Image (tube, helix red, strand yellow):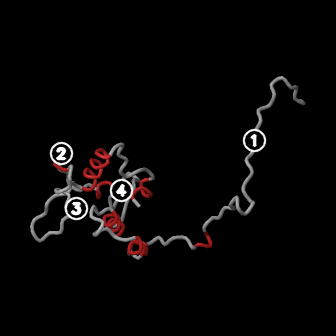
Amino acid sequence: MGELLLKEPLLNGQSELAQLDKMFKLLGTPVDPPIGVQNDWPGYRQMKNVKSFQFQSHPNQLRKKFPATSFTGGVTLSESGFDLLCKLLKYDPNQRISAAEALEHPWFQEHPPPKPKELMPTYPTRKEGLARKGRKYKSPDPLKPTAA
């Protein structure tokens, strides 16, 4: 969802460590919360290699990436849309929203509504035998005389 809004990769790390670093910089570094507060990544500190790497502590920056308003014409996301994006990006898969639940999220009811299916463009497929034939353009022969 974030990538569709940005029209570019949201977390494009070139290695596993770089990927984790980008996740932590955007979504915040997982922390051990106070007692009674739900952990954002249960078992993170107990993972095999976590103690081998030192990641800087970062707060969640997701709202800065997807602001509610923009004076520069950048990407914006309503409160409802931001709520859905946060639920899609939860570290803990048990806390993450399912695809079926996401489709029922109120963000999909916001204005403007999607186009009716009948108004969406359609394109013939190769299977239907209606595929557009590739056009081959040939440069004119510079030595061949042209009719003037």
| Mark 3 crowd level (few <14, some 14–19, many ≥20, 10 Å Cα) | some
Q: Find disc 2 in the rendering and name its residue.
A: 52
Q: Left or right: where does residue 93 sit relative to residue 141?
A: left
Q: Find disc 3 in the rendering and name its residue.
A: 41
Q: Can you give x and y, in whole percent of width and height, for residue 119 in the image? A: 61, 70
- Residue drawn at (27%, 64%), measured in percent from left and top? 92
Question: Mark 1 or mark 4, which has the lower sequence index?
Answer: 4
Q: Find disc 4 in the rendering and name its residue.
A: 70
| Mark 2 crowd level (few <14, some 14–19, many ≥20, 10 Å Cα) | few
Q: Find disc 1 in the rendering and name its residue.
A: 136
- Please name the amino acid that badge 3 sits on: Trp
Q: Can you give x and y, in whole percent of width and height, for residue 46 in the image? A: 17, 57
Question: Mark 3 or mark 2, which has the lower sequence index?
Answer: 3
- Please name the amino acid that badge 1 sits on: Lys
Separation of residues labelled 2 and 4 (CA atoms): 40 Å
| Mark 1 crowd level (few <14, some 14–19, many ≥20, 10 Å Cα) | few
The image quarter in which residue 127 lies = bottom right
Question: Mark 3 or mark 4, which has the lower sequence index?
Answer: 3
Disc 1 + disc 4, Cβ < 8 Å: no
**Label 2's element?**
helix
